[in-house]
Image (cartoon, rainbow, N blue to C red):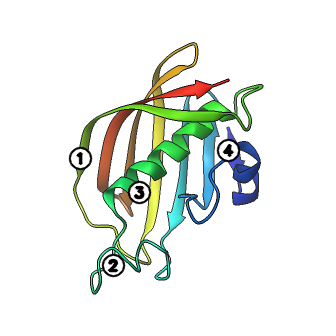
């Protein structure tokens, strides 16, 4: 198991701030799972526009955070660093609670199937111990 700081993450995958949706990946088991977090600051770019007077993290960006964490479980495998992963499918998407500024989102994902460059994942976000969203999805690793 490895831990990746934001600096380490930037060396492994191609998303960059402000679109990087994680601060740290504190538990990564290459080829198996990845877990990390993001602390939502009140001045996040999306909080300024979604929604006025009721800022929150859009559901699609929550899903993006899960896919970004998930990619680390693949990109940390030998010879995969700095390759690109592309979303192929998303299923069983569920949102349970609004995510607001100052929340620390705990992002978790595990590989449930892989064959060649095709990977299926199951992922979720929690705030404290409360489930916020979950999703099943597939990604492709681009050589």
In three-dimensional space, the C-alpha distance between marks 4 and 1, rounded to whole angstroms, equals 26 Å
User: Where residue 63 sits: x, y (%)?
Assistant: 39, 49
In screen coordinates, is 87 left or right of 24? left
Report crowding for label 2: few under 14, some 14 to 19, many 20 or more residues within 10 A (C-alpha).
some
In three-dimensional space, the C-alpha distance between marks 2 and 4, rounded to whole angstroms, equals 28 Å
Check disc 1 and report its element: helix, strand or loop. Answer: strand
In three-dimensional space, the C-alpha distance between marks 3 and 4, rounded to whole angstroms, equals 17 Å
Q: Earlier in the sequence, mark 3 or mark 4?
A: 4
User: Where residue 141 sits: x, y (%)?
Assistant: 59, 26
The quarter of the rendered structure image containing the N terminus is top right
In three-dimensional space, the C-alpha distance between marks 1 and 3, rounded to whole angstroms, equals 13 Å
Task: Tell me whether the residue at label 4 lies in contact with that at label 1, contact meaning CB atoms closer than 8 angstroms.
Answer: no
Question: Which residue corresponds to mark 2?
Answer: 55
The residue mark sitting in front, 1 or 3, is 3
User: Where residue 4 sits: x, y (%)?
Assistant: 70, 50
Question: Which residue corresponds to mark 4?
Answer: 13
Check disc 2 and report its element: helix, strand or loop. Answer: loop
Q: Earlier in the sequence, mark 1 or mark 2?
A: 2
Residue 94: mark in rendering:
1
Foreground: 113 or 55?
55
Report crowding for label 1: few under 14, some 14 to 19, many 20 or more residues within 10 A (C-alpha).
some
**Could you tell me which residue is drawn at 30 percent across and 57 percent down?**
132
In three-dimensional space, the C-alpha distance between marks 3 and 2, rounded to whole angstroms, equals 13 Å
In screen coordinates, is 56 left or right of 11? left
**Could you tell me which residue is drawn at 48 percent across and 74 percent down?**
45
Q: Earlier in the sequence, mark 1 or mark 3?
A: 3
């Amino acid at each position: 198991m490895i831990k990746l700081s934001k600096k380490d993450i930037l060396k492994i995958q191609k998303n960059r701030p402000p679109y990087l949706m994680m601060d740290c990946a504190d538990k990564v088991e290459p080829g198996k799972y990845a877990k990390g977090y993001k602390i939502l600051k009140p001045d996040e770019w999306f909080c300024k526009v979604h929604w006025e007077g009721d800022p929150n993290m859009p559901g699609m960006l929550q899903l993006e955070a899960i896919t970004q964490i998930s990619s680390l479980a693949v990109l940390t495998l030998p010879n995969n660093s700095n390759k690109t992963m592309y979303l192929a499918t998303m299923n069983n998407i569920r949102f349970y609670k609004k995510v607001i500024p100052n929340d620390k989102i705990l992002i978790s994902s595990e590989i449930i199937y892989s064959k060649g460059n095709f990977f299926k994942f199951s992922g979720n976000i929690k705030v404290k111990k409360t489930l916020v969203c979950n999703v099943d999805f597939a990604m492709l690793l681009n050589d």
